[in-house]
């Protein structure tokens, strides 16, 4: 089973009217299906603009986050060490 990377889907037939597909998706990416298999993703301009707002965390931010979560994560790590 293929994992979809979006909650919105459309068929190739529905792409005859792409404006309706994009309208229904509300600015989110749409998985395009043919015979129940994903053949493409349609990504509206709005979604691309939203992607610019994300950034990659710095190493200092990652280490700081790990330090904050250490007491929660450590029991899991100890458990997995024995497996």
Image (cartoon, rainbow, N blue to C red):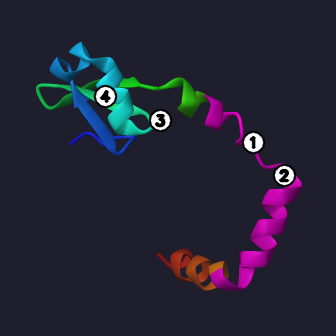
Q: Which mark is residue 27?
A: 3
Prevalent SS, magenta region:
helix
Label 4 element class? helix
Label 1 element class? loop
> Which residue is at the front of the view, 19 or 39?
19
- Specify start and end residues of the magenta stretch as a single range: 49-72
Give the residue drawn at x 22%, y 14%.
Answer: 16
Quadrant assignment, res 1: top left
Do the residues under discs 1 and 3 have CB atoms within 8 angstroms?
A: no
Do the residues under discs 1 and 2 have CB atoms within 8 angstroms?
A: no
Mark 4, residue position: 21
Q: Nearer the viewer, mark 3 or mark 2?
A: 3
Mark 1, residue position: 55
Quadrant assignment, res 74: bottom right
Label 3 element class? loop
Verify whether residue 66 appears in magenta: yes
């Amino acid at each position: 089973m293929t994992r979809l990377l979006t909650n919105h889907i459309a068929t190739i037939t529905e792409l005859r009217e792409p404006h309706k597909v994009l309208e229904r998706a509300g600015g989110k990416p749409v998985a395009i299906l043919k015979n129940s298999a994903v053949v493409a993703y349609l990504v509206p301009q709005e979604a691309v603009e939203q992607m610019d707002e994300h950034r990659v965390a710095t190493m200092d931010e990652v280490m700081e986050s790990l330090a904050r979560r250490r007491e929660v994560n450590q029991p899991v790590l100890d458990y997995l060490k024995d497996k």
